[in-house]
Image: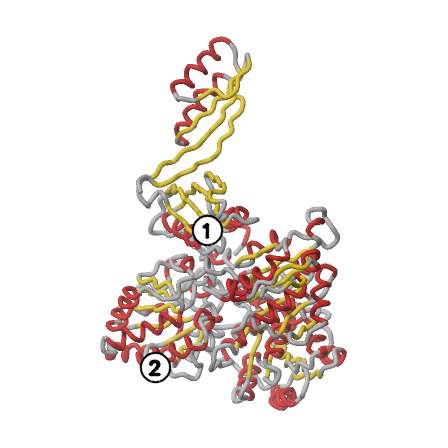
């Protein structure tokens, strides 16, 4: 029954038993036995990245676009330390990821051996859990436990550090079904009394709002469907965080757009003015709340979250519901229906009247130009030309372009939008587009980027070429670190310290050097044709879209301000942020 | 606006200031945390406290069940009520943590600490040290002609009091275990 095999073979067997089809990795001395085992099989494909950070972001995006955990294999020392940013990113955004690292042989641990690092020590605060496996007999069970922990409860990254002698040695394989995982079983069903309390509030609420987040997407497509049913049958307005985009369709009539620092006017004012806030799988992040004392001052707040530590961490809530979004929504709908599907529809209708007034402000309008491409215009055209594509995925880097993408692109379904939210990792997008395209070879995968972020992990263009991954790198090139520049304009007396991109490469030639296609566009009149050319090309494309250099991203809730104190469009921004706000990030 | 002329405390209203403004009283709580006795588990718990800026007043750890491979960590911590709640939630969600008990709120409990106190003195001071130790029911676990090592068990306050009395009598060294605590009754 239980078979004997080497530790390296165990890794492959355990991954197969877990249904893994793809591993993102980079070989090195301390993982050579596992790479040897990979060489001798064909069930699991290995994607060779160009940098270990790329492997982690690719695996994150693979996970977010498929709902399955992402798997990374890297070597000891620098291989492991290069994975730290991706681990932290996955922890902040609750992405299930399993990172396998090689380690120097057990008898050399602690001797400052070549490429030795205290990997479990370094990654302890940036993983959900991690292990150093010192016995081959324990390796397979640990891998099965790792998958269980990464995917149960609030998902997150885990790491298994495997010394080289453990990979060589022979041990007994523990099958998945026999692995001991009972001690970690987070509660998924919500408390029925609390759910009923929320239903009662929903029945009488005059100005309700759903505030949804990444937890809906992590809970599976069933959760998104339940959410849509709930919104449809209650007719309450809905907004979402950056991480939750796609859980409710952007074309849906109750959709207010994203909320938060760069959220829409209607979403933020509705959050500020509501009398019942129903937080579903979001965590009152500081990008959402603005100044805490002024956050939605007159509302009752309910919070559905699978992580007890997220509840009452930042904002005190009146109805906490600990549980998995899909399970809680299912019960919520049942209770609400069984009590007669009541809402205060007259008041809610009035609330919609107010919201429509806010919508009429058209907060995302901007001054267009026929001489220079505005970044908003570029994204509007990208949206218009790709939204009907049957299988479109968007990844982003971090900065102004990311916020514009969230504002101007519409997501109809979950798992279509890959972005670094909590950690805000510049350099996320290129490897993320690799991970998505590997998972969905025939899909249209577009990485909306800024030129500065894009260059942080541009080496992964080589991965695109090697594996025929036709990702479209859509770079809004303003030759600036746009968001840094915007803050320097608003906060630091227009002293633009180190926030411009000098000595940029010729992106067209760079694309060609990597074996892809390069397109440059600077005239708004040519933009549609250029985008169509990008879409038509069967291979990776770098699209160098030269845009307005000094465009600011609005609306914006300045640091230290409340939701009803947003800056709009070209409004005067002078002294918009006081000394107190300046100290915030 | 000059970043350098900011008033001290001007980030008081920061979104990063997680303290609940409704209850600013600092409370002391004793937590019993049952954990898997695995490599690095103590580092995990301590890392949580240092990483999130929580206080540790005292911490003890030892294996309590060899078969089940379980250790018990007793932590005395201080914070506002909301911070204490957050500490417990953060501990409880760790994979290696099985159970978190707040002995301060879960009913009456007994707290004890063991200390060894070395006093070097001659003459009257030596006699006085020995006599005081009897009042405190400390036992002498080592002696030379010029020194005692006292062993004392009790609440942290009792040990504090003893240490204070020994200081003028030639106290040279103190070793304390930190608090171990358990609930009273069934």
Q: Residue B10 — which label?
A: 1
**Horizontal arrangement in the rendering, residue B9 relative to residue A496 (left or right):** left
Of B173 and A43, which appears nearest the observer? A43
Q: How many marks?
A: 2
Name the residue: 52% across, 63% down.
A178
Q: Secondary structure at mark 2?
A: helix
**Horizontal arrangement in the rendering, residue A462 relative to residue B112 (left or right):** right
Of B172 and B147, which appears nearest the observer? B147
Q: Provide residue A212's location: percent of width, then percent of height.
A: 41, 71
Q: Chain of mark 2?
A: A
Q: Provide residue A181's location: percent of width, then percent of height.
A: 49, 61
Q: Provide residue A257's location: percent of width, then percent of height.
A: 43, 77
**Horizontal arrangement in the rendering, residue A309 relative to residue A466 (left or right):** left
Reply above or below: B84 against B153.
below
> For the view shown, which residue lies furthest in the right direction?
A513
Q: Residue A232 — which label?
A: 2
Name the residue: 34% across, 72% down.
A209
Name the residue: 38% across, 75% down.
A238
Q: Residues within 10 Å of mark 1 (few under 14, many from 20)?
A: few
């Amino acid at each position: 029954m239980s078979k004997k095999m080497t530790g390296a073979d165990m890794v492959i067997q355990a991954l197969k038993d877990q249904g893994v089809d793809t591993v993102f990795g980079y070989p090195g001395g301390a993982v050579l036995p596992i790479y040897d085992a990979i060489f001798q099989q064909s069930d699991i494909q290995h994607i060779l990245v160009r940098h270990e950070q790329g492997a982690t972001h690719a695996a994150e995006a693979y996970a977010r676009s498929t709902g399955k955990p992402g798997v990374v294999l890297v070597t000891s020392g620098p291989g492991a330390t290069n994975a730290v940013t991706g681990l932290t990113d996955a922890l902040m955004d609750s992405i299930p990821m399993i990172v396998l690292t090689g380690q120097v042989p057990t008898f050399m641990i602690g001797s400052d051996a070549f490429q030795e690092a205290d990997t479990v020590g370094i990654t302890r605060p940036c993983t959900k859990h991690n292990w150093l496996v010192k016995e081959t007999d324990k390796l397979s069970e640990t891998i099965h436990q790792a998958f269980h922990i990464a995917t149960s409860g609030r998902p997150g990254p885990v790491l298994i550090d495997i010394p080289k002698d453990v990979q060589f040695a022979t041990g007994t394989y523990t099958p998945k079904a026999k692995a001991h995982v009972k001690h970690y079983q987070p509660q998924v069903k919500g408390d029925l009394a609390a759910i009923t309390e929320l239903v009662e509030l929903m029945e009488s609420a005059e100005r309700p709002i759903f505030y949804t987040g990444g937890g809906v997407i992590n809970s599976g497509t069933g959760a998104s469907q339940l959410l849509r049913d709930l919104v449809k049958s209650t007719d309450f307005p809905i907004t979402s965080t950056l991480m939750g985009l796609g859980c409710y369709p952007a074309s849906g009539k109750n959709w207010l757009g994203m909320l938060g620092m760069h959220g829409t006017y209607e979403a933020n004012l509705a959050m500020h003015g509501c009398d019942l806030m129903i937080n579903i799988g979001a965590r009152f992040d500081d990008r959402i709340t603005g100044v805490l004392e002024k956050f939605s001052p007159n509302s009752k707040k309910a919070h559905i979250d699978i992580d007890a530590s997220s509840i009452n961490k930042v904002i005190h809530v009146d109805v906490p519901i600990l549980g998995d979004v899909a399970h809680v929504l299912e019960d919520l709908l049942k209770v609400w229906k069984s009590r007669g599907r009541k809402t205060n529809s007259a008041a809610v209708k009035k609330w919609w009247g107010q919201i429509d007034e806010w919508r009429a402000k058209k907060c995302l309008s901007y001054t267009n130009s026929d001489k220079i491409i505005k970044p908003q215009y570029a994204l509007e055209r990208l949206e218009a030309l790709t939204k009907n594509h049957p299988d479109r995925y968007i990844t982003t880097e971090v900065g102004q372009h990311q916020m514009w993408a969230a504002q101007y692109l519409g997501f109809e379904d979950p798992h279509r939008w890959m972005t670094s939210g909590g950690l805000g990792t510049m350099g996320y997008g290129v490897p993320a587009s690799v991970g998505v395209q590997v998972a969905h070879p025939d899909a249209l995968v577009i990485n909306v980027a800024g030129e500065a972020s894009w260059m942080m992990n541009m080496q992964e263009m080589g991965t695109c070429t090697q594996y025929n991954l036709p990702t479209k790198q859509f770079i809004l090139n303003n030759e600036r670190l746009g968001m840094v520049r915007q803050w320097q304009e608003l906060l630091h007396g227009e002293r633009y310290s180190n926030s411009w991109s000098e000595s940029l490469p010729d992106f067209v030639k760079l694309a060609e050097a990597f074996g892809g296609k390069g397109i440059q566009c600077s005239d708004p009149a040519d933009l549609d044709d250029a985008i169509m050319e990008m879409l038509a090309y069967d291979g990776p494309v770098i699209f160098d879209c030269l845009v307005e250099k000094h465009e600011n991203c609005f609306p914006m809730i300045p640091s230290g301000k409340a939701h009803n104190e947003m800056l709009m469009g070209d409004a005067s921004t002078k002294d918009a942020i006081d000394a107190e706000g300046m100290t915030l990030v | 606006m000059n970043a350098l002329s900011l008033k001290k405390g001007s980030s008081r209203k920061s979104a990063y200031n997680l303290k609940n403004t409704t209850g600013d009283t600092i409370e002391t709580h004793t937590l019993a945390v049952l954990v898997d006795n695995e490599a690095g588990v103590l580092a995990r718990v301590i890392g949580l406290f240092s990483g999130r800026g929580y206080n540790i007043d005292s911490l003890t750890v030892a294996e309590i069940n060899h078969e089940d491979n379980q250790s018990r960590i007793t932590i005395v911590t201080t914070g506002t009520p909301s911070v204490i709640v957050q500490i417990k939630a953060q501990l409880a969600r760790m994979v290696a943590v099985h159970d978190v008990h707040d002995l301060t709120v879960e009913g009456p409990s007994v707290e004890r600490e063991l200390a060894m106190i070395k006093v070097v003195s001659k003459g009257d001071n030596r006699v006085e040290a020995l006599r005081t130790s009897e009042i405190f029911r400390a036992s002498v676990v080592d002696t030379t002609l010029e020194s005692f090592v006292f062993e004392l068990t009790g609440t942290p306050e009792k040990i504090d009091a003893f240490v204070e009395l020994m200081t003028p009598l030639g106290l040279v060294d103190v070793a304390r275990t930190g608090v171990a605590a358990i609930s009273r009754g069934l």
